[in-house]
Image (tube, grey):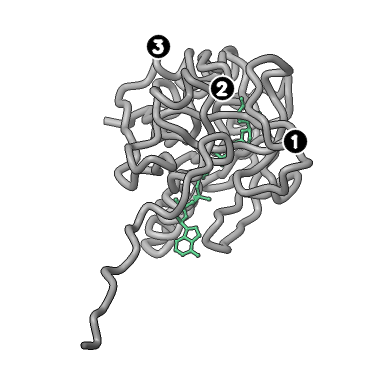
Amino acid sequence: MPELVFFSGTMDCGKSTLALQIAHNRSARGLQGVIFTRDDRAGEGKLSSRLGLVTQAVEAAPGMDLYGYLVGRMSKGDKVDHVIVDEAQFLAPEQIDQLARVVDELGLDVFAFGITTDFRTKLFPGSQRLIELADRLETLQVEAMCWCGARATHNARTVGGVMVVEGEQVVVGDVDRPAADIGYEVLCRRHHRRHMTSAASHAGALSPDVLPVNHA
Ligand SMILES: Nc1ncnc2c1ncn2[C@@H]1O[C@H](COP(=O)(O)OP(=O)(O)O)[C@@H](O)[C@H]1O
Ligand SMILES: Cc1cn([C@H]2C[C@H](O)[C@@H](COP(=O)(O)O)O2)c(=O)[nH]c1=O
């Protein structure tokens, strides 16, 4: 049975990498997919991973009918075996409904990847609709870590190095940005609640110093 699957996790946990791996493994077996993305850091019409891989994708612009686009491609004779969607949190709820229709009426698997919550811990509308409609929810296995060593579960936004909890929901950006910019850091819930980023906590390296060696 074709499925709508939502793979979610914090920023920087390997979602785009997994999307590229699924695309690669399927194309190695002759299956052709359509890859959608929205507002990837690498630019319009790109799906990029921090591991350095990047591939062409169709920019799922606001207002674009994803179901209609796929029907158009297939009616022109294009082979479409599955659909991959990265940065799915940025899609409108109606576009997620269109993806569910792709599964049910075109019989294609749809693999969507995205973060569930924003820097205020509120669901993105696209992610909310995916949680409501997906056949299956998958949490990424490679866990991003908070500076304290706990599993990171939340995304913090920093402005000038300081965590903020007000602002526009969508600001494209990255982790490990210079302090002056808008940046992001993944945190455990405890430290997100306390607004305690790595800089605010003056956290050092997680690994303890080596024991002093006595050369006596
Ligand atoms: N230099 C590196 N060596 C090994 N793994 C890396 C390196 N840089 C990034 N990664 C891996 O890539 C992951 C981020 O992948 P990416 O697909 O860009 O994440 P996401 O799409 O979830 O934001 C990191 O969690 C880490 O596991
Ligand atoms: C938390 C949060 C994130 N974003 C943006 C920042 C990035 O451009 C993407 C997430 O990309 P990733 O591949 O998962 O690292 O989302 C945002 O716009 N608003 C937010 O609150």
Residue at left offset 34%, top offset 63% = 209
Please state if 169 lies on the left or on the right of 136 as rendered: right
Q: Is mark 1 within 8 Å of ligand 2?
A: no
Q: Secondary structure at mark 2?
A: loop
Residue to which mark 1 is pinned: 160
Q: In this image, 207 relative to 200: left or right?
A: left
What residue sits right under mark 2 in the picture?
A: 118
Q: Is mark 3 within 8 Å of ligand 2?
A: no
Q: Ligand 2 within 8 A of label 2's CB? A: yes
Task: Indicate which disc residue 132 carries.
Answer: 3
x, y percentage for residue 1?
26, 30
Is tag 1's residue or tag 3's residue first in the polypeptide sequence?
3
Q: Amino acid at mark 1?
A: Gly
Quick one: label 2 or label 1, which is nearer the N terminus? 2
Who is closer to the viewer here, 113 or 172?
Answer: 172
- What x and y, as percent, mark residue 90? 62, 25
